């Protein structure tokens, strides 16, 4: 059985401009580029309601974010 703290390695191909922007953002927040990518993916999953468990509930309990999605703005 896999432990909860076990990490998986994945190969991700990114546009160089996207990667450079992630690296700059990570440096601004004192994270590694890998940690920044995980942070962004985790937040996207939470926002979409697709991350199971307590982490998803924490974000939902805070209510809507200040920004709205393009679909919300168009309607």
Image (tube, rainbow, N blue to C red):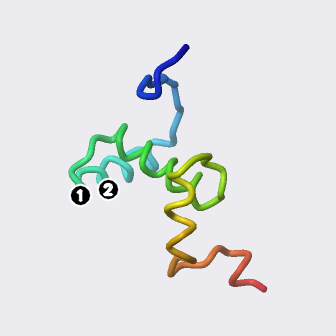
Label 1 neighbour load within 10 Å: few <14, some 14-19, many 20+? few
Quadrant where the C terminus sits is bottom right
Q: Which mark is residue 28?
A: 1
Q: Tag on residue 50?
A: none
Q: Quadrant of residue 56?
A: bottom right
Image label count: 2
Residue 51: x and y in percent read 60, 48
* On screen, residue 58 above or below 54: below
Q: Which residue does the image show at 65% across and 57% down from the upper left?
A: 49
Percent across and percent down for residue 32 are: 28, 41
Q: Is residue 18 found left or right of 72 in the rendered image?
A: left
6 and 44: which is toward the camera: 6
Q: Position of residue 50 (x, y in %)?
A: 66, 50
In-image side of 40 versus 63 (left or right): left
Q: Is residue 20 above or below residue 68?
A: above
Mark 1–mark 2 distance (CA, rounded to whole Å) = 5 Å
Q: Which residue is mark 2?
A: 25
What residue do we see at 46% from left, 52% from top? 40
Q: Name the spot of residue 5 as percent of width and height, x first.
A: 41, 27
Q: State the SS at label 1.
A: helix
The residue depicted at 46 percent of the width and 49 percent of the height is 18
The front one of 42 and 75 is 42
Which residue is nearer to you in this view: 27 or 4? 4
Residue 47 shown left or right of residue 7 in the figure: right
- Secondary element type, mark 2: helix
Q: Quadrant of the N terminus?
A: top right
Whether tag 1 and tag 2 are in contact, CB under 8 A, the answer is yes
């Amino acid at each position: 059985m896999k432990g909860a703290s076990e990490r998986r390695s994945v190969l991700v191909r990114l546009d160089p401009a996207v990667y450079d922007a992630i690296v700059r953002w990570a440096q601004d927040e004192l994270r590694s580029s890998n940690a920044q990518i995980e942070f962004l993916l985790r937040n996207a999953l939470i926002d979409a309601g697709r991350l199971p468990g307590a982490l998803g509930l924490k974000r939902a309990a805070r209510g809507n974010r200040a920004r709205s999605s393009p679909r919300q703005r168009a309607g």
